[in-house]
Image (cartoon, helix red, strand yellow):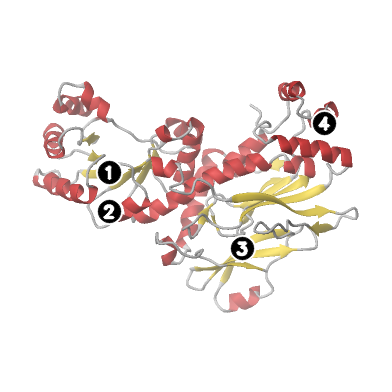
Amino acid sequence: MTTALRTDRYELTMIEAALASGRAKRRCRFEVFARRLPAGRRFGVVAGTGRLMDAVADFRFDGATVEWLAREGVVNPATLEKLHDTTFSGSIEGYAEGELFFPNSPVLSVTGTFAEAVALETLALSVLNHDSAIAGAAARMVAAADGRPLSEMGSRRTHEEAAIASARAAHIAGFGATSNLAAGEQWGVPTMGTAAHSFTLLHDSEEEAFRAQVAALGPGTTLLVDTYDVERGVETAVRVAGPDLGAVRLDSGDLPQLVRQVRAQLDSLGATNTRITVTNDLDEYTIAALRGTPVDAFGVGTALVTGSGAPTANFVYKLVAVEEGDGSWRPVAKASSGKASRGAAKRGRRLIGADGVARAELVIVDETHDGIPDGPADRDELRDAGASIRDLTVAYVTNGEMDARYRGADGVRLARAHHAAAVGELPADALRLSAGEPALPTVFQ
């Protein structure tokens, strides 16, 4: 299905006006960046790039789309004729999916004619703002969990398509599994799930429900023990499944106190290897409050799929350079108060200290043309000091040819591994939940 209508009307009216002025085919460079991180966040996580590449591949004004635009009178017939069956022939580069970003990081760059590049604005922002917001929240939860596994369980708290994208983004940021089967089928995210309270209520007793679940799924299953009385539920669970019961799940109550009581009870019943999973409207703060308690795993729903207080990554999509008649490139920038942008092509690099800890976000600016310079003048000096510079930018599309490595389930696995490595470079205090300045300063060079 074409994605061409997943855009704002003014993208097409701008194309119509640019065709009239003779500028629609002028080569341009647009960049995606965030002027600032969401309040309280010290870093962001790039997510959604693989989904965006799928959407770009399907971005085509086919016959049915053109017919609808004609009926609605969105643009004139001459514009529709130009749009009909055109595909993106430009180039897209950006931060590898799973990478961290900071204020003014050039997260994505789109180079092509004005018409084809501006048409992607709404689509790029809708995908990247949503998925990066979810990944940013997920990364904070992963940090708060101190290595204990987390599962995404928020499908019933968001739009059905957003649920799939959220599971994908959370997995990239370190969540181990999702309850959403479509995310497993489309993106290779491991799936999990056992039973809800309704299953217990369906049966005439809690014991009958537990026996039915164990008979179907084996003693390694997870039994939900708080439908009625937790203490009685734990006793019944161990009696039915035996000491090899896989796990019990708690979805209510004063969790810090309750999990200690349940752990003591399980141990007293001989179920010393039975794990405790908690859910109950968790966010990064409630997860952090469970540090030092015998929780083995977390299931997170609403807070995760809504960005845990930051539902957008604050990305904007701005024109930064235009090609002149002689083939040179001229920087352009918005000067509005509070919304000024910086013109010229840019590329992101990260300064890594000799100890392997990131020191700064380097944004390399090329004010003369669309090419990218080799790097900062002090590169050799930095190496002599034991520091290094890591290039953050990869090519997704080159002259209309898309790199398939970053798409599908393989792209998700690649992004997940890349994210883990990038987080491993952060200074330790960057993972604390207390608000502060961005973990790395952004330095323009």
Q: Foreground: 8 or 215?
A: 8
Image side of residue 65 versus residue 304, left or right: right
Instruction: Tell me how far mark 2 sits from mark 3, CA to CA.
Output: 36 Å
Q: Which residue is mark 4?
A: 79
Instruction: Tell me how far mark 1 sits from mark 4, CA to CA.
Output: 56 Å
The quadrant in which residue 393 appears is bottom right
Q: Which residue is mark 3?
A: 349
Q: Residue furthest right?
A: 326
In the rendered image of this protein, does residue 218 appear above or below residue 44? above
Instruction: Tell me how far mark 2 sits from mark 4, CA to CA.
Output: 59 Å
The quadrant in which residue 320 appears is bottom right
Chain-order first, disc 2 or disc 4: 4
Image side of residue 205 versus residue 176, left or right: left
Rendered-image quadrant of the C terminus? bottom right
State the SS at label 4.
helix
Q: Residue at x 19, y 50 (%)?
A: 257
Q: Nearer the viewer, mark 1 or mark 3?
A: 1
Q: Foreground: 364 or 353?
A: 364
Picture mark count: 4
Q: Which residue is mark 1?
A: 278
Amino acid bearing label 3: Arg
Q: Which residue is mark 2?
A: 290
Residue 106 spot, x, y in % from top left: 64, 56
Chain-order first, disc 2 or disc 3: 2
Residue 216 in sight in this render: no
In the rendered image of this protein, does residue 203 appear above or below residue 238? above
Residue 193 spot, x, y in % from top left: 33, 33
